[in-house]
Image (cartoon, rainbow, N blue to C red):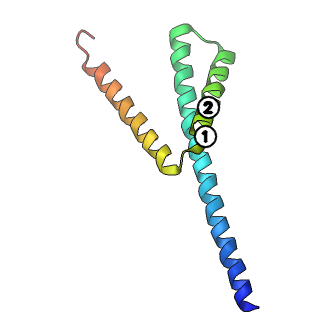
Amino acid sequence: MALDMNGVMQGAQKQAKSSMIQMFTLMVKVFTGGMLGVTFALIGQEAFGFGTFSFIFVSVTILGAFLKIAKSWKLMSILLFDAFCILLGFLLKMYILIAPGA
């Protein structure tokens, strides 16, 4: 009886750990998709003069598209994608600051 209860507790701990990792991965995906959505919406707002409705629409659309694309990605894949986006942002910022004739 005691061995059976021990197995149940270990199974519950393993399931709780797996659920927490999945929930954290989903939160990271939503944060990343949200940042991408806001970034593209800000670009559209500055380039084309979007209004508030279009800003929110583009943000939500990009978030949904990213969640669809990243559905099968694991946590490490998301973090690598985030690192790539951050490095690309730094590269673009450096280009803008150093650009000749600016």
Q: Give me the disc on residue 30.
A: 1
First in sequence, mark 2 or 1: give its number. Answer: 1
Q: Quadrant of the N terminus?
A: bottom right
**Front in this rendered view, residue 69 or 88:** 69
Left or right, residue 5 beside residue 34 = right
Amino acid type of disc 1? Val
Secondary structure category for the residue under label 1: helix
Mark 2–mark 1 CB contact (< 8 Å): yes
Secondary structure category for the residue under label 2: helix
The residues tagged by marks 2 and 1 sit, at their Cα atoms, a distance apart of 7 Å
Residue 54 in the image, given as x and y percentages of width and height: 66, 16
- Residue 64 in which image quadrant: top right
Residue at the spot of label 2: 63
| View extreme (left): residue | 100
Q: Is residue 18 above or below residue 82?
A: below
- Residue 85 in which image quadrant: top left
Q: Quadrant of the C terminus?
A: top left
Q: Please give the name of the residue rendered at 34% of the width and 31% of the height, measured from the top-left corner.
A: 90
Left or right, residue 96 beside residue 83 = left
Amino acid type of disc 2? Leu
Left or right, residue 35 beside residue 14 = left
Residue 29 in the image, given as x and y percentages of width and height: 57, 42
- Residue 99 in which image quadrant: top left
Q: Give me the disc on residue 79.
A: none
The local crowd at label 1, few if under 14, some if 14 to 19, many if 20 or more residues have their Cα within 10 Å, is some
